[in-house]
Amino acid sequence: MGPLARCARFLGSRSGQGFILYLCFCQLLAAGVGYGFYASNLSWFKEHKSEEKITALQLVDAFVGSYTALRTQLSATNAPVPATFRADSIAAFNKAHGDDSIFDLHWVGFPGREIKTAPLDAATADTIRSFATTSEPKPVTEIRSVNGEPVFRTVYPSLASQQGCVDCHNQLQAGKTTWHLNEVMGAFVIDVPMSAFLRSNLIEAAGLGAAIFLIMATAGLIFALYHHRKSVETETAQLSLAESETRFRDFAEATSDWFWEQDESLRFARFSGDGRSSEITSTADIGKTRHETVKAGVTSDQWAQHDADLAARRPFQNFRFQRMLSNGQLIHVSISGKPVFDARGQFRGYRGSGRDVTKEVAVELELARRVDERTAELRAAQSELIRKERLSALGQLTATMAHELRNPLSAIRNTLFAVKETAANKGIDLERPLTRVERSVARCDRIINDLLDYTRVKELHLAELAPDPWIEEVLSEQRLPAGIELERRLDADCMIAIDPERVRRVLINLIDNAAQAMPEDARERKITVTTALLDDSHCEFAVADTGAGIAADVLPKVFEPLFSTKSFGTGLGLPMVKQIVEQHGGTITITSEIGKGTRVTVRLKQLAQTNKGIAA
């Protein structure tokens, strides 16, 4: 392992993470000590320099006061006034020392009333004004920037302490605001450069902080490396031990969830396992046989085979049974075992393993279910294929029949017309037999048309409409036999897309079947047509009658082509109705009860709400 890899491993360890946190603490501590040192030196500088400068300014002020008193005593009117003398003296002092002076001294007058020198800047002017509003003004010290360089500025208030000074100033500023004794007439301003001090202070503070950080970081690194080496040694030993344990456990548990042992009398003596297996293998089963502990999931044949294996002292595999857990969950268990013999060949019991195979059983059941589903789908597809083949054959046969039968039927119609005229001319009454023949010819023609319609699926011509008004219109055109009551209960406020002519045929066929199902001597002859909304996507209409009903063994066959219980008809009415409904994507169901009647329900899809709104 290279140096970079070892470094990365150290930093990723707990010792390395702790060392990083320790470095952060050292940085904070070093920064705090350096800042404290820097702030302490700066405070010391302010305190001592302020005292020095204020003492010097007090001496200058005392000197100027003595000059004022002497000038008054000598009546030296030609001598400069104190303010001018003071300002000129300070200017001469500054000029004599030049730019290398350790400080810069000024005397400035009150803002707007100065004799010689105005305040250096607005801040100084504000400070002098604040002196005037205070009964006992005190010197003010602050750090300011002058020409881009930091300076320590001391502003010392200058008061009119002698009447001679006041009189002199009032003479010079005649006509202006009168000066009074002890008023603030200006201030001494002394600026001490701080660049060198601040730079030196910063270097010393940074050096102190760096030294503290390096000393503490070095000590911490030595300790962290030592701790890391010990941790690596301990971790390596633990990993080796854990790997050995894991290898043994993997070998032992690769094919099982728990282990069990039985004694020579086939009673359970020991279970091993934890977690979920402890719920399956209860200590209450100790001392019991398998017959006493297994209650479900084993057939008599399986028990017989298992008992035969135990009696013959043979190994057994995948003996399955069911077990109820304490939480009520039913699980599937599979066990395997092997007989144990001692050194003398005496049977000492069985040892084996157990597994929870609930998921495997679920997969097997799901696989079986899917196989059953696919088998059912294949059978349905096969039935549909056979139906289509039959329908195709029926279509070919129907087309041939229609062609072969319609020619004779046309000849019969023409002959009937000639026979009618001949009989009428000769005065022979053949009206009834000839009418019977005409009806039979018409019936044959209708049968041919029904067969052709059933075998040739027509393209739908859909139209969007409301079902209730459309059904009402169809019913109003329907003519029922005398004595039959037609009841309407229409309550489907929706829009559907249907082929009106095709669905009209469905409704008329259902009503005709309902009328034919009620004999003339029936106690009640009533047909009820209803509509209803099922949900947001489907609606239905139903035709119910009070006829004799359809037998249970006949009901499954009513949609089979050519099946009919009537003495007349082709047996294509309901199959054609089912074909039309399914072509619309709908379903049709029939329920019937002997002696009470039959109900045929057609379910169709509604149009979407947006389409309903547009159609409205």
Image (cartoon, rainbow, N blue to C red):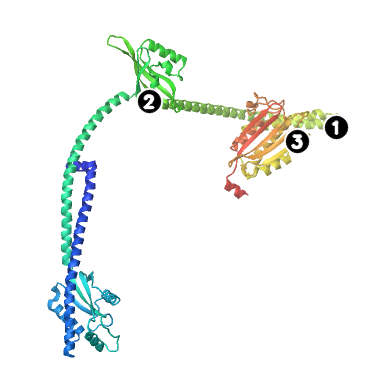
Nearest to the observer: residue 525 or residue 436: 525
Q: Mark 1 or mark 2: which comes first in sequence?
A: 2
User: Considering only vertical position in the picture, is 103 above or below 227?
Assistant: below
Question: How far apart are labels 1 and 2 at the CA level?
Answer: 109 Å
- Report the amino acid beneath label 3: Glu
Rendering coords of residue 72 (x, y %): 18, 88
> Which of label 2 and label 3 is nearer to you?
2
- Report the amino acid beneath label 2: Ser
- Label 2 sits on a secondary structure element that is helix
Q: Which mark is residue 93?
A: none
How crowded is the residue under tag 2: few (<14 C-alpha within 10 Å), some, or many (20+)?
some
Question: How far apart are labels 2 and 3 at the CA level?
Answer: 74 Å
Nearest to the observer: residue 567 or residue 399: 567
Q: Which mark is residue 425?
A: 1
Q: Which residue is mark 3?
A: 485
How crowded is the residue under tag 3: few (<14 C-alpha within 10 Å), some, or many (20+)?
some
User: Considering only vertical position in the picture, is 552 above or below 484?
Assistant: above
- Label 1 sits on a secondary structure element that is helix
